């Protein structure tokens, strides 16, 4: 089995910064595309940023220039550096990854989420 575990969420004032981490563990041959999603109360889950195994990135327009996604393939870990945070960034942030098993089967996994609250 594979688990994705997020960490780094919390309460921060507007204009502040947080760094989220997501580590994949378990029976893993390789981790392909990884991404961060978020879901605010009463809203649908939305893509925040994606990063391919090769390091290509994609961002939602609302976070461009403020958030930076990165990964460490050796550690099966992905990061999200969030700067200049706004109250509208408040949400539960979820990690998502396409994981290749040793039988080469690809399965998409979700983490349980970490709460980010931006408030004064």
Image (cartoon, grey):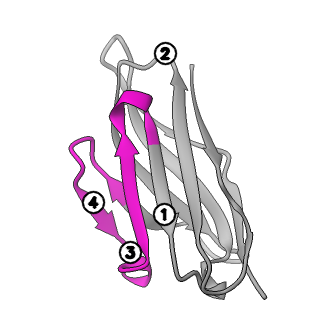
Q: Which image quarter holds the C terminus?
A: bottom right
Residue 45, position in %: x, y? 56, 66
Residue 62 on the magenta span: yes
Rounded to the nearest angstrom, the CA distance separating label 4 from label 1 is 13 Å
Q: Do the residues labelled 2 and 1 touch (CB within 8 Å)?
A: no
Q: Do the residues labelled 3 and 1 touch (CB within 8 Å)?
A: no
**Residue 27 numbered mark, or none:** 2
- Vertical placement of residue 63 versus 111, above or below: below
Chain-order first, disc 2 or disc 4: 2
Q: In this view, does 54 lie to the left or right of 59?
A: left
Contact, mark 2 vs mark 4 (Cβ under 8 Å): no
Q: Where is residue 115 in the image (x, y as percent from the top left)?
A: 72, 62
**Label 4 vs label 1, nearer the camera:** 1
Circle 4 residue: 57
Asked where in the image residue 14 lies, by quadrant, the reply is bottom right
> Residue placed at 62% from the left, 85% from the top?
88
In this picture, which residue range is highlighted in magenta? Answer: 50-77
Considering depth in this image, is 29 or 16 the residue closer to the camera? Answer: 16
Contact (CB < 8 A) between labels 3 and 4?
no
Secondary structure at numbered mark 1: strand
Nearest to N terminus: mark 4 or mark 1: 4
Query: Does the stretch in magenta take in 48?
Result: no
The location of residue 15, given as percent across then percent down, is 60, 86
Q: Which residue, given by chain and number where applicable, does mark 3 sit on? A: 60
Q: Mark 1 points at which residue?
A: 81
Q: Marks 3/1: CA distance? A: 14 Å
Secondary element type, mark 3: loop
* In the depicted structure, whether residue 33 falls above or below residue 85: above
Label 2 element class: loop
Q: Position of residue 18 (x, y in %)?
A: 60, 66
Q: Counting residues from the N terminus, which is met first, the one under dot 2 or under dot 3?
A: 2
């Amino acid at each position: 089995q594979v688990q994705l575990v997020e960490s780094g969420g919390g309460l921060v004032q507007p204009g502040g910064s947080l760094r989220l981490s997501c580590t994949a563990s378990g029976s893993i041959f390789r981790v392909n595309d990884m991404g961060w999603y978020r879901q605010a109360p009463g809203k649908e889950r939305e893509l925040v940023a994606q990063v391919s195994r090769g390091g290509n990135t994609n961002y939602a327009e609302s976070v461009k220039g403020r958030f930076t996604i990165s990964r460490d393939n050796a550690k099966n870990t992905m990061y999200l550096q969030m700067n200049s945070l706004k109250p509208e960034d408040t949400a539960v942030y979820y990690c998502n990854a396409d994981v290749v098993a040793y039988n080469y089967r690809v399965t998409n996994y979700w983490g349980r989420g970490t709460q980010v609250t931006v408030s004064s």
